[in-house]
Amino acid sequence: MTAPTLTEKLAILADAAKYDASCASSGGVKRKAGPGGIGSVTGSGICHSYAPDGRCISLLKILLTNHCIYDCLYCVNRSSSNVARARFTPEEVADLTMGFYKRNYIEGLFLSSGIIRSPDYTMEQLVRTAKLLREQHLFCGYIHLKTIPEADPALVEQAGVYADRLSFNIELPREGSFSQLAPQKNAPAIRRAMGGLRQTLDRAKQERASRHAPAFAATGQSTQVIVGADGAHDAEIMRASAGLYASYDLRRVYYSAFSPIPDSSAGLPSRKAPLMREHRLYQADWLYRFYDFSVDEIEASTDNGMFDLTIDPKTAWALRHRDRFPVDVNAAPRETLLRVPGLGVRSVDAILRNRRTGRLRIADVGKLARSLRSLRHFVVTDDWRPRALETSDLRARIEPKPRQMDLFG
Ligand code: SF4
């Protein structure tokens, strides 16, 4: 059998990486480009292109290899999977990245890998790739390295010198699922690795504050949770995420809807998790991080732990707490305004700014928010008082019209 060409390898290893959702670069800092340096990370983030399913597409997102000595049942790259295999050398990945970057196809690299030989060996290869890009090609663009939890922490530290972001995938929200679905993985080891990285990141931040120390994984660490592979319901996943944010100061938890893979185990669902479920988790995650919702409140917007696929979690919560509405947009504090369906952080801040100079009418609120469609049922102004708040058909009135049904499939 002839060895695969570079193009064939790229096809295999880009396809193998598509299940990894964690590829946003928000919060990156500019690397100092010395003579001949190329590429930049903008403060507002470079991942500004998204596929219709919400995944970022402006990074070269590949695996170093899809060979893997582990056998995680939910993974298409597991050792027992019957898929075409390929492997890049670090030099090939560095050349590809630079070639694509210069042709303006991509703005950075997201690199993950199956485990080859050992976690340390794999991690060395990942570090070597990033080092080549930074030191040989003088690449200053965004690099996100997926790190191997069982690898020597010293290697993870080296990775942070070259990468803008590091991430360990926790993958299974239920610790008890590991022995059944990912027998070679060890949940406590992943958590230890995340804890170790948090300490290093904290230390690096302090050093940078006191002197001109080099950047270390400036955009922090993130993780990914697979939705629907084990039996964890949405509220359980959100509770796990809240614990991860609190314990490891994560920048993001990414949610990836489980897709059945060829020859999958009977222990896994045979149907794809709805993409809308993934979307609802992102919305709930947003409520937790930016809208001061507690995990208990988020859970209170679910039915038996599952988010409603028809309406967003904030609206679901408001419908169950109608006694808290309507909210007076001219008097309510920020935290109360943030609870109003249809008002985002920016609209709330605009309302607070604008009401300093005069009382807002409902039309003014409409201009500051994206739409009055559901919002008008939950707010009161001098010229507007909702009538339908107590009626049983309120939900039907504010439910979005069916569209993009594929999100539910
Ligand atoms: S270690 Fe990663 S690549 Fe290997 S089987 Fe598990 S999830 Fe897949």
Image: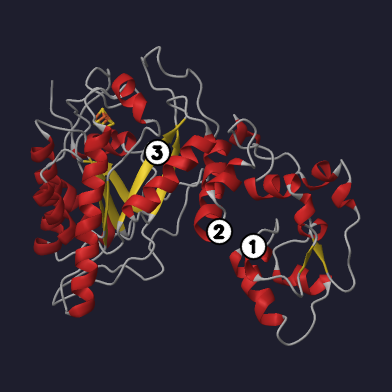
- Helix, strand or loop at label 2? It is loop
Which tag is nearer the camera, tag 3 or tag 1? 1
Mark 3 burial class by Cα count in 10 Å: few <14, some 14-19, many 20+: many
Type of the residue with mark 2: Asp
Which quadrant of the figure has residue 123? Answer: top left
**Nearest to N terminus: mark 3 or mark 2:** 3
Which tag is nearer the camera, tag 2 or tag 1? 2
Looking at the rendering, in which quadrant would you find the C terminus? top right
Marks 3 and 2 sit apart, C-alpha to C-alpha, by 22 Å
Observer-nearest of 169 and 18: 169
Residue at 27% over, 22% down: 83
Image mark for residue 292: 2
- Helix, strand or loop at label 1? It is loop
Do the residues bearing badges 3 and 1 touch, measured as CB atoms within 8 Å?
no
Do the residues bearing badges 2 and 1 touch, measured as CB atoms within 8 Å?
yes
User: Quick check: is the Cβ at mark 1 less than 8 Å away from ligand 1?
Assistant: no
In the rendered view, does 9 fall on the left or right side of 384? left
List x then y, in percent, for residue 372.
Answer: 78, 61
Res 319 visible: yes
Residue at 65% over, 81% down: 353
Type of the residue with mark 1: Leu
Looking at the rendering, in which quadrant would you find the N terminus? top left
Image mark for residue 338: 1
**Nearest to N terminus: mark 3 or mark 1:** 3
Type of the residue with mark 3: Val
Residue on which the image places disc 3: 225
Eyeballing the image, is 377 above or below 146?
below
Residue at 87% over, 41% down: 392
List x then y, in percent, for residue 148.
Answer: 19, 41
